[in-house]
Image: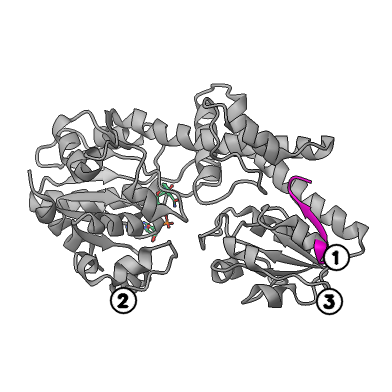
Amino acid sequence: MKTVSETKIGFVGLGYVGTVSAAGFAILGFDVYGYDLDERKVTSLINRQPLIYESGLQEVLLDADISSRMHFVYDIDNLVDNADVIFVTVGTPESIDGSCNTSFVTQALESILSRLTERGLDSIVVVKSTVPVGFTQEFIDSLGNDEGICRNICFSPEFLREGSALDDFLNPSRVVIGTTDASIFETVAHLYGKYESKGVPILMMDPTSAELVKYASNSFLAAKVALINEFADLSHAVGANIDTVSRAIGMDPRIGNEFMRASVGFGGSCFPKDVSEIDHRSNSLGIRHPLIGSILESNRAHIERMTDRIDRCAKHQGIRTISILGLAFKPDSDDIRESPAIEIASKLLERGYVVKAYDPLAGPNALLALPKGIEILDNAYDCMNEAEMVTILTGWRSFRELKFCRSGSVRIVMDLANVLDGETIGAMGLEYHNITE
Ligand code: NAD
């Protein structure tokens, strides 16, 4: 077995997962290679200026020692020729029918296998993109029995969270390796040797079970967010305090206190599409799973209710201009994919409000996703200028430092991310609402 310094790892697909994983393995001492179809991404990483934001990523890329182990290439063959283990980290977006689109994974696998076969190499290919349950085994079976074709393929789900992805990579709760081949397992597990010595479980299972682990994990988490948000609404209606309620519920170890904060709803590149795929799969198998089927519906209804709450409050006070603070689907990220904030901002514009918006990082991405009529400002104070109502939709810590004052145009602060101190805002003579009240 090769040592860490001898083992070279490739990443095909340099989005959030590919870039962070490449940086993470470079930190662990491996030589890494990265390739993406999108040449802009390769160039940006060669220049050590990533197009995505992840906490700590820029620092790793600028660390001469770690960075000297990171190689980004424009030619996939160059990567395949160099890497002992190749991770597929391309996107698997949602198709129009709600299922998972695996075409990028298939294309990447075909390019990798064709080169491995041409060169007679037996490197291991690890699918890390989230793929439908059964995909990896079906792909392996489709290769047939011809001699010389590399079949060293396994599936290993990725659990990192945007916003703390590098930290998650370095401190995983578990590593799942989906293969029935002991030698593939051993080689891939060897990459995570440093974790094993820290007591991180490295689990071996068949690829189909590993694929289901990923979908079931995301469905559980999405359901938890949807459920606490339903209770937040109920709490609001009956005059209870959801923060107090969720703290008490979370003390039950069977439930736990993570993902128990009420919010404007879940979004991002994973929960919506993964829940949609598993719902689609249940339906196509003819199995009735009403709980899974209702997770997305619950989230959509919640986002609609949040929009209504802002709308009602603004109408009641005769307000026309609303400032939105926070557009990313979560704080510490520039990702706006499926962000509830983008949806709420668009709906408020449709309902006739003048909408201005600001996000510490996601402004440039939001510009491409928001309708033309919404002005995106470069700082929070410009965004609040002339607005009568401020609504906070993403819980950035930096919003806690904002100074609100009575002399400006703002009369109402609606803090749907529960980041501000309501008493301080109230003491300024402003009306304050949070998700609880
Ligand atoms: P992303 O959209 O940020 O990046 C995907 C990259 O793949 C893009 O840069 C694209 O140009 C590239 N690509 C597409 N086809 C290619 C090909 N044939 N060859 C080379 N590059 C190609 O996606 P992401 O957020 O990094 O997610 C990647 C996968 O990981 C998805 O399946 C996702 O569901 C899963 N995942 C994502 C997260 C997350 O937080 N983002 C967490 C866990 C799992």
Quadrant location, the N terminus: top left
Q: Quadrant for residue 11, please give it.
A: bottom left
Left or right: residue 102 versus residue 45 is right
The residue under label 3 is 407
Span shown in magenta: 427-437
Going by the numbered disc 3, the residue's amino acid type is: Ser
Residue 430 falls inside the magenta stretch: yes
| Residue 417 x %, y % | 66, 53
> Which residue has dot 2 on it?
47
Q: Are the residues tagged 2 and 3 within 8 Å (C-beta)?
A: no
From the top left corner, tell me how far across and down residue 51 is, in percent: 42, 69
Label 1: which secondary element: loop
Residue 13 in view, yes or no = no
Q: Is residue 294 above or below residue 346?
A: above
- Residue 46 pos. (x, y %): 28, 73
Q: Residue at x 28, y 62 (%)?
A: 35
* In this picture, residue 331 sits left or right of residue 157: right
Q: CA distance from mark 1 to mark 2?
A: 49 Å
Could you say whether the residue bearing mark 3 is in a helix, strand or loop?
Answer: loop
Distance from the alpha carbon under mark 3 to that under mark 1: 10 Å
Q: Is residue 400 left or right of residue 308?
A: left
Mark earlier in primary sequence (3, 1): 3
Residue 385 location, quadrant: bottom right
Q: Residue at coordinates 75% horizontally, 70% vertically from top-left? A: 404
Residue farthest toward the top in the current orientation of the protein: 287
Q: Is residue 400 above or below residue 251?
A: below
Q: Which mark is residue 61?
A: none
For this rendering, which residue is in front, 125 or 267? 267
Identify the disc placed on residue 429. 1
Return the residue nearer the eye: 400 or 43. Answer: 400
Residues packed near mark 1 inside 10 Å, few (<14), some (14 to 19) or many (20 plus): some
Q: Earlier in the sequence, mark 2 or mark 3?
A: 2
